[in-house]
Image (spheres, helix red, strand yellow):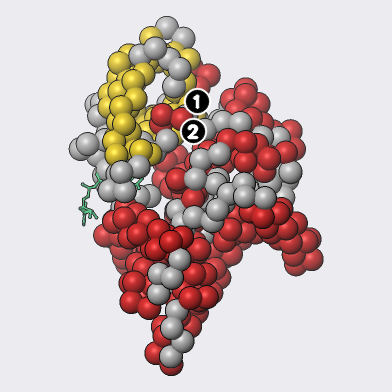
Amino acid sequence: MAEPLAELRSEVAAFLAAEQATGRFAPRCDAWMRGVDRGFSQDLGRRGWLGITWPTAYGGRGQPHLARLVVTEELLRAGAPVASHWIAERQIGPAILRYGTEALKHELLPPIAAGELTFCLGMSESEAGSDLAAVRTVAQRDGDGFRVTGTKIWTTNAHRAEFAYVLAVTDSAAGKAGRLSEFVVDMRTPEVEVRPIYDLAGEHHFNEVFFDGAFVPEGRVIGTVGRGWEQVTAQLAFERGGPERFMSTYPLLQALAAGAERDASAAEAIGGLVARLRGLRTLAWETARRMDAGEAPAQAAAILKFLGTSYEQDLLETARRLLEPGSEATAAMLADVQLAMPGISLRGGSTEILAGIIAKDAEVAR
Ligand SMILES: Cc1cc2nc3c(=O)[nH]c(=O)nc-3n(C[C@H](O)[C@H](O)[C@H](O)COP(=O)(O)OP(=O)(O)OC[C@H]3O[C@@H](n4cnc5c(N)ncnc54)[C@H](O)[C@@H]3O)c2cc1C
């Protein structure tokens, strides 16, 4: 296994170095959310690096999750513009693969693996962020499909997406376990409206998305109607369990290692960060191994994101203290990360909520 993965790693790294050398992209932090370049995603798709773990029948390469981890580590290390395909490839594809009908798999997995589709995530609502069970968006049966009505918020890249994943209530009388269902909504449906929200940096990636009776055919239900809670819990493992939870800021670590004043205390601080990164990588590899075994390791993913967030916060503090913003690019990177940091501890599950999940697991294990 080690050899083919090493080969894959050097292939991806060489491609990225060449693309960067031609000026196609400049490394940036948080590029998996902010670096949007559809053509770049399609190039990755042509090389077989998206959906790499999926069966070939659905456009994948039938490789282990460790291979996907190698590809994603290299993309994040380079700060490459991968946001166009990221959500679709990271969690919607795996959710469809796990729960979707054959028809849905054949319809959506090959174009996701080709880097041709952008998905947005319609989970959060103004009164339902940490507590997703409280979503109010409803999906009512209508003939051979459903009509979706409600408002989602903080929907990253909804203005660029062809499709939205939407978590909605299909049985308001049922308890948490039977209340929710998952849908793929075509963003070109006339009853869908996207309104921008600008973040601290003045960038537009968030949105509010309004669904006013948007029709979703039965074939675009993910999995079983009423099993949305169980299914979304598995999906969150794919959302939280990847290396972007500690490598969003890798270009900043590189700038710090190259540019900081080198006295003994700086070396100690940077060395400490590198050691923590090493530990986080070990956790990510363990999580990928468990995915290879068919699990959706929710607890391991929560631990990874919890520790990854605290590492990224400490990296920023260390960079602020030690980094001489010699070049304009370094100063801009530092400012970028500073403005993105409040979101890092919230997106994909806040630190307090993850601490709760980890503590509950510890209680069960005692
Ligand atoms: C950069 C970014 C991108 C995002 N992209 C998307 C997206 O594409 N799609 C999407 O659906 N959502 C997205 N979100 C929303 C994100 O998932 C939510 O912000 C997050 O789940 C928290 O929900 P909330 O904002 O409603 O905060 P709340 O749930 O209101 O929480 C506010 C604070 O209270 C704390 N808190 C809440 N409940 C508890 C509790 N029981 N115990 C202890 N503390 C608690 C939280 O930890 C948090 O600090 C994004 C958010 C960010 C910042």
Dot placed on the residue nearer the N-terminal end, 2 or 1: 2
Task: State the residue at coordinates (67%, 43%).
Answer: 44
Considering only vertical position in the picture, is 306 above or below 139? below
Task: State the residue at coordinates (45%, 17%).
Answer: 188
Give the image quarter of residue 192: top left
Name the residue at the bottom extreme.
264
Q: Is residue 366 visible?
A: no
* In the image: residue 175, left or right of residue 63: left
* In the image: residue 166, left or right of residue 31: left
Task: State the residue at coordinates (49%, 69%).
Answer: 255
Viewer-closest of 13 and 183: 13
Quarter occupied by the C terminus: bottom left
For disc 2, the marked residue is: 119
* In the image: residue 262, left or right of residue 153: right
* Relative image position of residue 113 (x, y in whole percent): 65, 37
SS assignment at label 2: strand
Q: Amino acid at mark 2?
A: Phe
Residue at disc 1, CB closer than 8 Å to ligand 1:
no
For disc 1, the marked residue is: 162
Q: Amino acid at mark 1?
A: Glu
SS assignment at label 1: loop
The answer to whether marks 2 and 1 mark residues whose Cβ atoms lie closer than 8 Å is: yes
